[in-house]
Amino acid sequence: MASPDRASSVGGSPEDTELSITLTLRMLMHGKEIGSIIGKKGETVKRIREQSSARITISEGSCPERITTITGSTDAVFRAVSMIAFKLEEDLGAGSDGAAVGRSPVTLRLVIPASQCGSLIGKAGAKIREIRESTGAQVQVAGDLLPNSTERAVTVSGVPDTIIHCVRQICAVILESPPKGATIPYHPGLSLGTILLSANQVRG
């Protein structure tokens, strides 16, 4: 989910407005990918935080999927995404018996409110086609909502350079089209029963 958080930009120049935007990007990752990003004793995620200046949090839990949330200025978030994509590519390459088969494509799954996905797809799919053609990345917006949420997965695949270019374009679209209505965020591993139980406990 990307949310524009503009400081008082009334009367400011477009450049000022751009600088005052805080971006939040959520990504769905498998355990192995999370392991790559965290690194030994948390060293990798610490380095990404320090070098990108972005705030990075990884959801707790023992389920196979977890949410990585990246927050910061647009530049900080894109730096973090870039470092994550290159790290995943490096680990993919290390796992392919050393054969020089060329660069392995990396896949990132962004979690975006469904109300913003229409803008991302565009009229008759025009916008998403434009993003695919201009970046060279594969982009797929899931038809179904993620369980117990109002969010969808947007899968981006390609070599890191194309992925980063693609994520920039996706973020530009969703910053221009804020989510409509309340967003129920996706939490991996939460069943509807757990959510209802929590709601009852809050009420009771």
Image (spheres, rainbow, N blue to C red):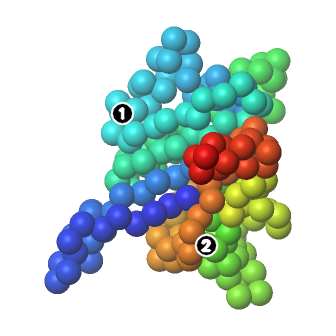
Q: Which residue is mark 1?
A: 51
Determine which quarter of the picture holds residue 106. top right
Determine which quarter of the picture holds residue 148. bottom right
- The answer to whether residue 118 is above or below residue 204 is below
Q: Which residue is mark 2?
A: 116
Q: Residue at x 77, y 87 (%)?
A: 124
Pick whichever, 182 or 77, lies toward us.
182
The amino acid type, in three-letter code, at marker 1 is Gln
Instruction: Choose the circle earlier in sequence order: 1 or 2.
Output: 1
Asked whether residue 118 appears in the rendered view, the answer is yes
Quick check: 201 left or right of 13? right
Query: How far across and how far down the image is residue 12, in percent?
Result: 18, 78
- The answer to whether residue 79 is above or below residue 30 is below
Q: Residue furthest left?
A: 11
Query: How far across and how far down the image is residue 9, in percent?
Result: 22, 75
Q: Residue furthest bottom?
A: 123
**SS for dot 1:** helix
Q: Residues within 10 Å of mark 1 (few under 14, many from 20)?
A: few
